[in-house]
Each structure stands twice: as structure tokens, then as C-alpha cells.
Image (tube, helix red, strand yellow):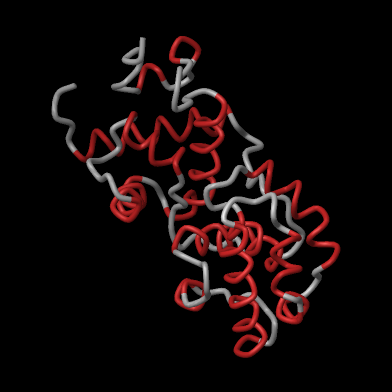
């Protein structure tokens, strides 16, 4: 593909978003939650684990632990056992307790609404903070870059970045701020349903005319 100007890439990105919006009008976060604390805990658990597996575990977990103080008061071994079906469950249990301890001590048990406050919590990086801000508080501070977003960014050649931080900056430059949360959801849905890591379905892909990597995986 010839070198693409930033203006042309932005125009192509606009077309890509439009197609994704029409293809996945109901795209949303697939972690099941009913409040910001539940989403925060679920997102911490989702690292290196599928949303489906997390939802199976949190269905019971959220009935047992309803407030940040409940996680703080839990016996560490019991909490670990409650999430044992999740990868890295012992470390995640420690992070959830440490995170909730700060919520109780510094935030009145409530999940904070700023990126800096969220990323200061145990087990919470920028990706997790973006998930919580975008989905629990409808605040577009950044773009969630998971493995699907990272893969599609590369295949669609939306930039040259290879790290989540650089990829996020490039996506933020290409798409309007009020679309950042939905951009993540629609890229993730497309990655799960069409542009899979192995055997992507290029023949039926809605983006094939705009994708420099189309049919490169035969």
C-alpha cells in the first residue's frame, strides 16, 4: 500500500467507523455489571481471561460482595477461592482487596471518576481505567486497547504504533473524542466476530475494501 497521508488515513478511519457503526449498532461492553464497583472488579478479573469466564464467576461474586468494604473484610483465602476459576486468581484477589481498601479509605467506598485516581488503585492500569470511565461514567478519556483493538489497528494500518500506549494515541488522533468508547466496543466486536487472530473471515468482512491486509492470510 502506498504511503498514506494523515488526511487520507483520517478519511479512511471515518469510513471504517461508519461501517462498524452500521454493522454493530448494539455493540457494548460484554462484561456484566450493574454499578461502577462491579465493572471495576470485573475488569481487573478480565486480564488474560475471557469476558465469558469472568461473567460466570462474577454472577455469584457480586451477590456475595456488594460493597468495597465487603471485599476489604473478606478472608484473603476465601476471596481467592471465590475467583479460583480465573487465571492468576491469587494475585487478582490481592489486587481487588488492596484496590477496595483505598476506595474505602480515600473515596468513601465509591469508585473515583478521574483517570489519575483510578490508575492509582492496585491492579488498575490505563486500559482498566478507560473501561470504567467509558462504560460506568460515559466519560471518554481514552481508547481501550485490548488484544483485539491492537490486532485491528495493525491490520487496518491505522498507525505505526506497536505498544498499547502508542496505539491509543494514534486512535485518539484519528477519531472524535465522543466516539472513543464506542470505537473500542465496535473494534472488539469485529475482532471477535470477523477479524479473528487466526483465520480471519476476509471474504465476508465488511471492511475488506478499506483494509490493506484483506486476504493476506490465505
Q: Residue 173 at what x, y percent from top left?
A: 31, 51
Left or right of 175 on screen, residue 93? right
Which residue in the rendered view is the most extreme toward the front?
77
156 or 55: nearer the eye? 55
Furthest-left residue in this view: 3
Label total for image: 0
Q: Residue at x 59, y 51 (%)?
A: 87
Frontmost residue, 21 versus 42: 42
Q: Where on the picture, by quarter, is residue 111?
A: bottom right
Closest to the observer, 58 or 155: 58
Q: Is residue 135 left or right of residue 167?
A: right
Horizontal placement of 216 versus 6: left or right? Answer: right
List x then y, in percent, for residue 172.
Answer: 36, 52
Is 143 drawn above or below residue 209 in the view shown?
below
Question: Residue at coordinates 23% horizontally, 39% vertically from top-left?
Answer: 7
Q: Quadrant of the N terminus?
A: top left
Q: Is residue 25 above or below residue 184?
A: above
Residue 43, position as x, y percentages in the image: 60, 57
Decide which of 8, 115 is in the foreground and name it.
115
At a point 76% along the width and 81% down the height, the residue shown is 73
The residue positioned 57% from the left and 70% from the top of the image is 95
Quadrant where the C terminus sits is top left
Position in image of residue 116 (x %, y %): 45, 76
Amino acid at each position: 500500500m502506498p504511503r498514506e497521508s494523515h488526511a487520507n488515513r483520517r478519511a479512511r478511519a471515518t469510513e471504517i467507523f461508519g461501517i462498524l457503526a452500521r454493522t454493530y449498532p448494539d455493540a457494548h461492553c460484554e462484561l456484566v455489571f450493574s454499578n461502577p464497583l462491579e465493572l471495576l472488579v470485573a475488569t481487573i478479573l478480565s486480564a488474560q481471561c475471557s469476558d465469558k469466564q469472568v461473567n460466570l464467576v462474577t454472577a455469584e461474586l457480586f451477590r456475595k460482595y456488594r460493597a468495597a468494604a465487603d471485599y476489604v473484610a473478606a478472608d484473603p483465602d476465601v476471596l481467592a477461592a471465590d475467583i479460583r476459576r480465573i487465571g492468576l486468581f491469587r494475585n487478582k484477589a490481592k489486587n481487588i482487596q488492596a484496590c477496595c481498601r483505598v476506595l474505602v479509605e480515600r473515596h468513601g467506598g465509591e469508585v473515583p471518576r478521574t483517570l489519575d485516581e483510578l490508575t492509582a488503585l492496585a491492579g488498575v492500569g490505563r486500559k482498566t481505567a478507560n473501561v470504567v470511565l467509558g462504560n460506568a461514567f460515559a466519560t471518554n478519556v481514552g481508547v481501550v486497547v485490548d488484544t483485539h483493538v491492537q490486532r485491528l489497528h495493525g491490520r487496518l494500518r491505522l498507525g505505526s504504533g506497536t505498544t498499547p500506549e502508542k496505539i491509543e494515541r494514534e486512535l485518539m488522533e484519528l477519531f472524535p473524542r465522543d466516539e472513543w468508547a464506542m470505537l473500542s466496543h465496535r473494534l472488539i466486536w469485529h475482532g471477535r466476530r470477523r477479524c479473528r487472530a487466526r483465520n480471519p473471515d476476509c471474504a465476508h468482512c465488511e471492511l475488506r475494501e478499506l483494509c490493506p491486509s484483506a486476504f493476506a492470510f490465505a
